[in-house]
Amino acid sequence: MPTGNMTSGAGASFTYDEANRVSSITEYSGGQEEFSYSPDNKMVEQLVSGTFEYTWYGAKGEKLGKFYPSSVSTNPDGTWMPAVYSANIWFGSKLIFEGGNAVYGDRLGTNRANGARFYPYGDEITSTANNHVKFATYLRDSYTGLDYADQRYYASTYGRFNTPDPYVAGGASSGSVNNPSDPGSWNRYAYTRGDPINRNDSRGMDDCPIYGFATGSGCDDGTDDPCDPDSAAFNPLMCQQGSSPDQPPDNPVPQVNCQQQLENTIDNLLINKGPGGTPSPLIAYDAWFVALGLQDNINPLLLVAVAGNESTWGTSHLAKADNNLFGVMSCHRANGQIACQPAAYSSFADSISGGASVLEAQIYTRGNNTVDKLYSGQKGAYCVDQPGFPCSKGDTAVTQILTGVGANPNKLGFPCPPENNP
C-alpha cells in the first residue's frame, strides 16, 4: 500500500496545514473546499464554493448539525441563530436521524438506510446520495467522495486514510500502531489493520473490535481501560463499577449498558437468520427496534421475534413486496362487507413503527400482555385463528424465540430500568 499523504486522488488535489490536516481540496473539474478546525482537530468551518458552513458538536463530541452563518435570524433578546442546514438526533451514543432522514446503523456503524450496501472497505454497491453518514459512521463528502472520519479523511476507493495515524501509545498495547507483535499495525494509513468486518475506527485515530455494537463516539480515548466500551482494551469481564483498570477485581462483574446489550442480543439473534445462514435484513434496524421499544414500553426482543416469525426474518414475499414485517392488515367497509388486505409500508422502518403501535395497543389497551394472549386466536387478539392457520403455531414460535434469548414471554414491557434510559 502506498504511504505518504494523499496529494491527489478522487478527482481532486489536496493541501495540508501545519498540523497535517486537510486545509483545502481543489477539484479537477472546478470548485474548491477550504477547512478550519477546533483545538481538538474537529472540522468546524467549511468554505464550499464561496459559501461558509459551520458544524456544531455536543459535549461528548457528537455532531449536532450543520449551519449557514450567512443566513441568520435575530431573536427578541438580540441574539442570533444561523440557518439550519441539517440537524442530527442521537439515541444515547447512536445517531438515529440526520437532516430529517432516519439512520439505520449496523454493527459497524454503517448506515443501511434506503437499502445501501457496501463492500468491506466502504465502496458502495448501490449508489445513494452523498453528504450523509455512510460507511462506519463516516460522513461522505459529495465533492470528493471522501469520508470525513472526525480526525482524518478516509478514501474508501483505496481502503486507506489520506494521512498517517497520529495516535501512538508506545507501540506496546494491543490495538495501538507500531505494535511489534502485530505487523498489521505498522501501516499507519491502513483501515482497521486489514479487518473491516470485525473492527471499526469511528474517529480515525485507532481501531477497535466490535462487541456487537459501534458507539459512534470513537474507538479509543488513548487509555487501555477495560471498563470503557470505547477502548480497544474493553473487556466487561475485567471490569466492575469502581474498579481500577490497572487492578482488575477478584470477582469481576460485567458492566454493559442495558440498551447496548439489547442491541447486542438482537444482532446475535439475527446474524444467521437470512438465506443460507447470512444476516437477516432486520439486523440493520437493531437500534430502531430498541428506540421504539423504549418509546412504546415494549420489549424490543418481542418486536424482533414477532417480525421475524411473521416475515421469515424479513425475507417473505409480503416483506419484499410491501415492506410488511408484522402481517398487519388494512381493512375497510365496502358494499356492506369488511374487506381486508395486507398493509403496505414505505420501508422496513415504517413497518416496525406500525407494528410497535399495534402491539402497544394490544398490550396496554386490550390487555393482551403475554405472548399466549397475543396469539390466543380469539377475536380482539393480535392473531385471530383462520381456517388452516391456527395462531398456536405463532405462539409457539415467538415463545421459543424469546426464551432462546433469555426473555420472558409473560413480561412484555421495556426491560431496562429507568436509570439506563436517556
Image (cartoon, helix red, strand yellow):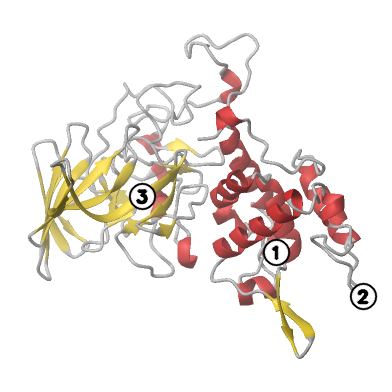
Vertical relation: 193 (above or below) 342: above
In the image, what residue occupies the spot 16% across and 40% down?
Answer: 77
Q: Residue type at mark 3? A: Asn
Asked if the residue at tag 2 contacts the one at tag 3, i.e. Cβ–Cβ closer than 8 Å, the answer is: no
Vertical relation: 171 (above or below) 195: above
Q: Residue type at mark 2? A: Pro
Nearer the observer, 366 or 228: 366
Q: Which residue is mark 2?
A: 387
Task: Report whether 275 appears left or right of 62.
Answer: right
Is residue 117 in view from this perspective?
no
Label 3, label 1: how far apart the Cα atoms are: 29 Å
**Mark 2: few, some, or many residues within 10 Å (few <14, many ≥20)?**
few
Q: Position of residue 374 (x, y in %)?
A: 82, 55
Q: Quadrant of residue 262?
A: top right
Q: Which residue is mark 3?
A: 88
Q: Position of residue 33 (x, y in %)?
A: 12, 57
Nearer the observer, 140 or 397: 397
Asked if the residue at tag 1 contacts the one at tag 3, i.e. Cβ–Cβ closer than 8 Å, the answer is: no
Q: Of the two numbered discs 2 and 1 on the same chain, state the one appearing first in sequence.
A: 1
Is residue 329 in view from this perspective?
yes
Asked if the residue at tag 1 contacts the one at tag 2, i.e. Cβ–Cβ closer than 8 Å, the answer is: no
Q: Of the two numbered discs 3 and 1 on the same chain, state the one appearing first in sequence.
A: 3
Label 2, label 1: how far apart the Cα atoms are: 19 Å
Q: Which residue is mark 1?
A: 326
Vertical relation: 35 (above or below) 11: above
Find numbered disc 2 in the image and state the secondary structure of the residue it sits on.
loop
In the image, what residue occupies the spot 43% across and 70% down?
Answer: 126
Q: Position of residue 180 (x, y in %)?
A: 37, 27
Task: Report whether 261 appears left or right of 4.
Answer: right
In the image, what residue occupies the spot 52% across and 41% down?
Answer: 213
Q: Residue type at mark 1? A: Phe
